[in-house]
Image (tube, coloured by chain):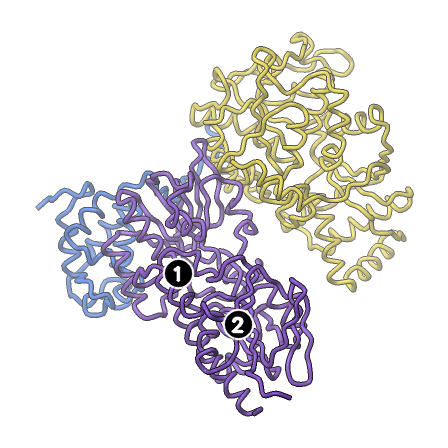
Chain colours: A blue, B purple, C yellow
Amino acid sequence: MDFGFKLSPSSAVNLDTVDRRRYDRLVQLEPDALTCIGCGSCSATCTAAPWSGMSVRKVILGLQRGRDDEVDAMLSRCMLCGKCTMVCPRGINTRHLILTLCRLDKNGEAVR
Amino acid sequence: MVNRTPVIAVIGAGIAGLEAARQLAALGYEPVLIEKAPVAGGHVAEWNRLFPDMTPASEVIRPLLEQTSGIRTCLDTEIASINRLKDGFNLVLSDGSSLICQAVLFATGFHLFDASKKEEYGYGIYDRVITNRDLEQWFNTRHDPRVDHPKAVGFVHCVGSRDIKAGNAQCSKVCCITAIKQAIEIKEEFPDAEVYCFYMDLRLFGKKYEDFYIKAQRDYGIHFIRGRVSEVGEAIDGRVVVKAEDTLSGKPVRVTLDLLVLMAGIVCNPDAQHYAREIGATVDEDGFLKSRNNLAAITESSRPGVFFAGACTGAKTVPETLAEARSAALAIHQYLSKRG
Amino acid sequence: MIYQGKQKIWADYQKEIPDDHWFYVRSCIRQNFFPASEKYFLKICRDLLGRDIYESEHHTTCAGIAYHCDTIPQETAMTVVARQFALMTEAGYDNLVTSCITSFGNYTEILETWREFPELEEKIREHLWKACRREFNKPKYIAHASDLVYKLRGEIAERARYQLVSRATGEPLRIVEHIGCHYSKMFPHKGVGGAEYPCVLSGMAEAWGGQVIDYPERRHCCGFGFRQYFVKANRGYSLSNTHKKFESMEPYHPDMIITNCPGCPYFLDRWQYVIAEMEGKTYGQNGYGIPAFTYEELAGLVLGVDPWDLGLQVHQVAVEPLLDKIGIPYDPAKKYLGMDEKKIKTPGLPATLKCC
């Protein structure tokens, strides 16, 4: 029956069921990713961010929260210029992190 | 009148009182420690290990107790009344005795916030909700049925701190780093457990604190979620369901945990307020005792002969408290020397 | 769950509820949704327990619903409320008891506002005088009708014909209690038991033999949320909140839900049909729903009032399986007979949610 309204999808993240396999594999390969403090320096300086929504901070957070589709959309906008790596206060090699991540599918398996 | 050694009443035999008494005795005075509890050592003696080097608390407490063993210490003792005399003070103790002294040092410390006041967190109602102090007790005794091989553990920062509604606007300073310490200890004990820290801001100001945080992130994989827990409920299996917002992604999060640790904050000690009012010292707006000058004279009250050391004026770390105790001893020495 | 911990909190949130002499104000909507609830509140208090409760045919809406929908300013709501106080004063009463939770919240909020801003009270007194030449005293006590039933729960228990237990097993019924948001979330000290663990309904349920369930989404809103439901574009939010509650309570297999708000039992009852149609999911036993009651209906049931006199036939979720479980007799043939014993229309049965 069409009531003219529906159950609204919830934006809440359930950490009990979130799929973190890709994140877990990433941090095995790039343990520095664990030390992100979400300061946003990377996004603030990003060449692609203002136009495309790319943000290394959000990529790392999105992986922790199981938002894989959002992560892939952001990664596809990266131009690999390396500016984010220059500004990261934790010294995370963000450019390398992005390249590593592009080689992992959502299950954390190597794709190429 | 016979020229006697000046007596200094030190109220509280926690680390501030013990260290100050030790210094005062070394300077040739006669300190008298007055302690409400049946043992000396205060909060630190109840703790297991201390940040950021995981130093056993006993390594701080034991030498202090040894070096103050010759000092007159009144345990299980409260102060019935304080009267100001012409050149000193008369303290009537709960055993009925009277203590005439030339100076009074408040080393009255703090109270740990009563976590049950944050009703939404369910301390005292939900079985798996404990406090930072309960967890230290577990580290000490390894006996608490609530800590039973947890697979998922949460830490709630700022419980009763930075909380105007709870009557405490101030930051308790030591809870962020204590949460990180306890999270690491839980992870060492239960390596397979997922550990979450829910924080508002991480205030890691002290020496080596940031290194400790990086270690918690990189070596222990502890999850830090920037968002204050809003509500805790109990699931049918007795585990706790925690709701917060992950403010960095702007989305609500929920997680089911086997153990939730509330980082109860540092609040003023009502006894200290009572004694301060009797002796004519000032209580500050935050409930802690008010120093004559917050920059240059933190250990001095506005009343001559009345001094402060440690957390009676606000949240302090162990090294800050010990340094203040020494500073207070010197301030007392100068005060008594001037009087001749 | 540590029951003593809750008792400790309940001890901190006890409010004074006078025993007798109340001026009663009805809800705008409850007589449509739950037609016998207010009637049986009055019957039980007056006829059975001998209390003096007065109501005036001149009383109107408290304007709380319009205030919460942002269609009138609060000063207008205050003037409407001032007129109810005038009616109470004219009738010679000091104690005001409200049927509606939003009214209770509205009255409480207004009195608290006047306490903080006495000049506003003076202004409203002027408004009222200009509008209808009336004057008023503020009530000495304000209670929600569930507060009063909570206070009288022991007297009701003494006269109860049925217990909230399974006749077959003797086990207490598993009861979800749901408190209207405007009862104590705004002013925790004005509600019995506070806002986090209110005991106004759980106290009744336990006094009458039931066992209360505490489930993770217990404190969550029923989903009504005036502007979520009234605006069709937002109605999915209303449904989603209710759905969230049912998903959370489902593992506990509740026998019934009891409520103290006009909207909550309506939404907790009717949305079960909508969820069943949309999702194919039902939450009771054998394809039925979980029946949701007002506390007056519950009091009427334990006192042995005929279920059809209590208006339980207008519930969406069938109550018969629960009546059978307790052992309360009813005549299925009389379910849809009106007050004059003539048949009112029998509703069609839904496709998914099993009904009688």
State the separation of the CA atoms marked 1 and 2: 20 Å
SS at mark 2 in the image: helix
Work out whether residue A45 or residue B255 is closer to the camera in this orientation and state it.
Answer: B255
Q: Is residue C341 visible?
A: yes
Q: What residue appears at the point 91 percent right and 45 percent down from the top-left corner?
A: C90
Graded by Cα atoms within 10 Å as few (under 14), some (14 to 19) or many (20 or more), the crowding at tag 1 reads many
Left or right: B217 in relation to B31? left
Q: Position of residue A34 (x, y in %)?
A: 24, 56
SS at mark 1 in the image: helix
Q: What residue appears at the point 69 percent right and 16 percent down from the top-left corner?
A: C162
Q: Position of residue B144 (x, y in %)?
A: 42, 42
Residue A69 to residue A97: above or below: above
Q: Which mark is residue B313?
A: 2
Residue furthest to the left in view is A112
Left or right: A88 in relation to B321? left
Q: Amino acid at mark 1?
A: Cys
The C terminus of chain B appears in which quarter of the rendering? bottom right
Left or right: C305 in relation to B314? right
Q: Which chain hosts label 2?
A: B
Q: Position of residue B172 (x, y in %)?
A: 47, 64
Q: Which chain hosts label 1?
A: B
Residue B18 to residue C264: above or below: below
Task: Tell me whether circle 1 and circle 2 mark residues in contact (CB < 8 Å).
Answer: no
The N terminus of chain B appears in which quarter of the rendering? bottom right
Q: Which mark is residue B176?
A: 1
Work out whether residue C130 or residue C300 is closer to the camera in this orientation and state it.
Answer: C300
